[in-house]
Image (cartoon, rainbow, N blue to C red):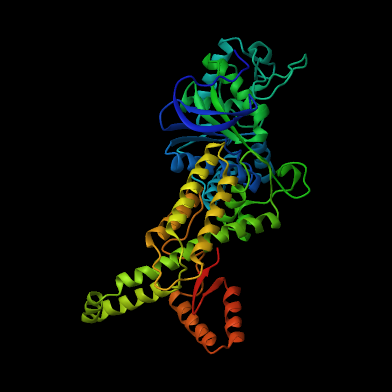
Amino acid sequence: MTMKWLQPTEGFRTGIEVYNCIVGKKVPLILRQKHLATVYTCGPTVYDDTHIGHASTYVKLDTIRRILQHHFGIRVLSAMNVTDIDDKIIRRSQERKCTWEVVARENEETFWRDLKGLNVLEPHIKMRVTENIQEIVEFIAKLEEKKLAYRTVDGSMNFKIRDYGAYGKLQKINVGEENVDFALWKGAKEGEPSWAAPWGQGRPGWHIECSAMASKVFGSNLDIHAGGIDLKFPHHENEEAQSCAHHDCQQWVNYWLHTGHLKLPGDAEKMSKSLKNTIGVQQLLSEYTANQFRMLCLLSNYRSSMIFSPEAMAMAQSVLGKFLSFLQDMLCLLSNYRSSMIYSPEAMAMAQSVLGKFLSFLQDMESILRGSRSIGNFNPGEIFEKYSKSSKKIDEHLRDDFDTARAIQILQDFMTFVHKAVNSPQSDGAAPERGCLKLCQEFVEQNLTNFGIVLPKDGAQGEESTFSGEVLEKILQIRNNFRKERNFAAADALRDALRDVGVEIKDHGETSSWTKKE
């Protein structure tokens, strides 16, 4: 067995570099199969609700999955375990005076609901520990055959770290004289659930679960194994050791990805239920949106610790708001061009022939003219050049260990550049390139979508408002009349009242547009 990381000598070179905790630097990501990544993620121990410390890990890893799929064109085959039997689950069932199954199933359901609420893609394969007991028993039995596992007096089974010979690959550790062997199987205790094994009743140890279930799906080698940084040692170290021993291989996982902790201001340690400093996902979503929390995660490298605070969330909201405002401006500009295409003698003749079609046409016109505005005399060549450079830079940053923070900065710079261009002074007869603006809109939309940001559909912005679009258009007409009459106090009061109910008004010369807040 080796303590070194072995770079794959064959396979698909992605052109991406990822941080490798074994060598302490970034290394080329080489997949076993072309355009396919096998990814195993450590899932939850379902004894309580999910908090945002857990959630940040899954949001960050979901972002990496989306980048691989949508930016690099790499299909991701993902699997995740659910630890549905554990000391904590048993204790919680005793506290609640119910079965362990009730605790596990309720919290597992909540976990998947929370991930859906955060727009995290579910894994292709979900595996519960209690549904894979036989595979775990067989995995341990093979380790015993290899003389790398031994039975204890209480019916447990432990792994022989010293006899393995390559322990401490992920995190350097001196295996001294003290007993550091870890449990593969825990002997049965009175009043606790247990399953049969050749060495006696009991249940799996924590570390063996992932090794056995990931091996069931991916075999003796997988591309990527991911989880929070707190799992690096001892959990992932133990997984690598027992899996290499079981499969007689030098390297079970080619790349380990670890996400940084989420902390609260002033806390030296990570968010943890034991420290009683947690914030639940549902509490988060009652105050912020999934997009806003994801933007907070995007603004730092996935390996870095991140602070969750009102100030940090305000920054994430501001960045996200600028992107959505930019896309709304592009929509307004493009809508102005669509009106000239739809409004024609042929269209009017058809509309006049049938009252229903005529009314539908007027409704379309109202929607199209909402937010129409004048446009500056920008240079399409400069826009295309900026687009080309920005696209290249974003690709470079994402290839550099999925650096979303720098990619977001490039996207913001691009947005600012385009905003400045379209708001430049007009020249007589200027006719801006519609295709150029469409390119800008799609470029920003595509990148945000690649990162997992859910964008409004069909020009709608944010959550549903108590006002319909038709009502808001009428209110805007009234406000614009106030502005034409130079009754700015009334116009401002109406604008402020709309802001209080989640509608933002933007003025564009003599016209205005509205958006519903994210």
Image check: 203 left or right of 470? right
Q: Is residue 452 above or below residue 197?
A: below
Which residue is at the front of the view, 391 or 43?
A: 391
Which residue is at the front of the view, 118 or 31?
A: 31
* Residue 50: % across, % down: 62, 46
Residue 446 visible at all = no
* Residue 23: % across, % down: 63, 24
Which residue is at the front of the view, 29 or 86?
A: 29
* Residue 172: % across, % down: 70, 22
Residue 126 visible at all = yes
Q: Is residue 294 above or below residue 377?
A: above
Residue 237 placement: quadrant: top right
Image check: 76 left or right of 298? left
**For the view shown, which residue lies furthest in the front direction?**
428
Q: Is residue 292 above or below residue 341?
A: above
Q: Quadrant of the C terminus?
A: bottom right
Give the residue at x 77% y 13%.
177
Residue 198 placement: quadrant: top right
Instruction: Tally the numbered discs.
Output: 0
Q: Quadrant of the N terminus?
A: top right
Q: Is residue 160 above or below residue 513?
A: above
* Residue 451: % across, % down: 51, 48
Which residue is at the front of the view, 218 or 389?
A: 389
